[in-house]
Image (cartoon, rainbow, N blue to C red):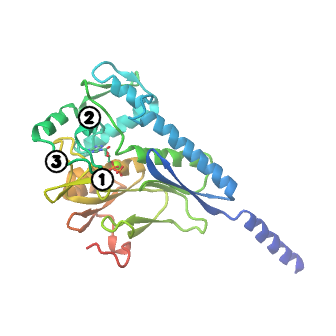
Amino acid sequence: MQKKYLFIAIFFLIHSLHAQQVYKRVLKLMGSRFEIVVVADNQDIGNSYINWAVDEIKRIEKIISSWDPNSETSEINRNAGIKPVKVSPELYNLISRSKKISKITDGAFDISYASMDKIWHFDGSMKEFPDPETIKNSVSKVGYENIILDPKNQTVFLKLKGMKIGFGAIGKGFAADKAKQLLINKGVKAGIINASGDMNTWGTQPNGQKWQIGITNPLHKNTVFATFPLTNEAVVTSGNYEKYVIFNGKRYTHIIDPRTGYPASGVISATVFAPSAELADALATSIFVMGTEIGIDRINQLPGVECVIVDDQDKIHTSKGIHIKKYLNKNNNTK
Ligand code: ADP
Ligand code: MG
């Protein structure tokens, strides 16, 4: 009998020594607030897991940043209209997937939007709407069809002089996916990579329950309007509550329709669930441009992808696989 108690005592001792816990770090990466969450045996191990993720995100930033003159992306932009540039398989494949998303969204998503960046400023400094002629001219260098990929030589060529690509709408999701994959490869059982609302999750909490992911209420920034249980899935929320301008009472976001050159309006927030944060990120941005109706229609055609949209009338719309009532938090003011 005593032996049995001894066994139980030893079992609990070993178990408590290996009790897994959640470790978190908040830091600035890629110019944004990142939160990295891992499940580990102790603080030291948790820290080293988080360090791996941080290094991976920094490595990705060095490849995709269009501000860093030494990045492969800047090299492509510098050679627009001049010559093809050989790039790493990682960047080549990201550009190739970006072009596919442009096709799915009829060009609402377009990494070559970047040449329009000069005329819009969403930091409060813009006092008047640019004139229609300037807007029209700004889209002349935009068009994913002019991003020429050569699979044999792994080169990227921007056909027009002055053309530019940028990963503002997909890069954080991509980085979250890469960091998650690296940690999984290294044997980390569970975690969340949260890149300012672009999240990818894997595994479960130490108690075996799924991660509980809160979506911020777009109109009441400090409250969570819905909470979703997630594992091995990505969720991204894009909202126009931070970067926008108001002209004649109408609110315009920092997401621009690449086909017209005008900023999107009508959608306040778009949350997309998808197998990867990269896809969720790109689609959340696209929904702003496509609008509620076309956005929902497109999402309904994509397997494994769902969305929740809040429009500028404060109304919630969902794709067909989401039963929003189940997840809505009490006391939120959204209709
Ligand atoms: P955030 O990073 O604020 O969450 P998004 O992921 O929605 O927002 O990306 C917005 C950024 O994407 C813009 O700041 C800009 O750099 C870029 N962008 C704007 N319009 C488009 C577009 N139509 N297609 C691709 N990228 C875009
Ligand atoms: Mg995005």
Nearer to me, 194 or 191? 194
For label 2, the residue is 115
Quadrant location, the C terminus: bottom left
Residue 164 numbered mark, or none: none
Q: Secondary structure at mark 1?
A: loop
| Type of amino acid at the residue the image marks with label 1 | Lys
Q: Does the numbered disc 1 mark a residue whose Cβ is under 8 Å from ligand 1? A: yes
Residue 275 vs 21, above or below: the answer is above
Residue at 35 percent of width and 35 percent of height = 96
Q: CA distance from mark 2 to mark 3?
A: 20 Å
Measuring from the top left, give residue 127's x and y in whole percent.
19, 49
Q: CA distance from mark 3 to mark 1?
A: 16 Å
Residue at 47 percent of width and 48 percent of height = 176
Residue 243 numbered mark, or none: 1
Q: Secondary structure at mark 3?
A: loop
| Image position of 20 (left or right of 268) | right
Q: Is residue 309 visible?
A: yes
Name the quadrant containing residue 131: top left
Q: How many marks?
A: 3
**Sequence-first tag of 2 and 3:** 2
Q: Secondary structure at mark 2?
A: helix
Judged by depth in the image, the label closer to the viewer, 3 or 1, is 3
Judged by depth in the image, the label closer to the viewer, 2 or 1, is 1
**Sequence-first tag of 2 and 1:** 2
| Type of amino acid at the residue the image marks with label 3 | Glu
Disc 3 packing (10 Å; few <14; some 14–19; many ≥20): few
Name the quadrant containing residue 37: bottom right
Q: Check whether the beta carbons of the residues at disc 2 and disc 3 lie within 8 A of each other.
A: no
Measuring from the top left, give residue 50's x and y in whole percent.
59, 50
For label 3, the residue is 128
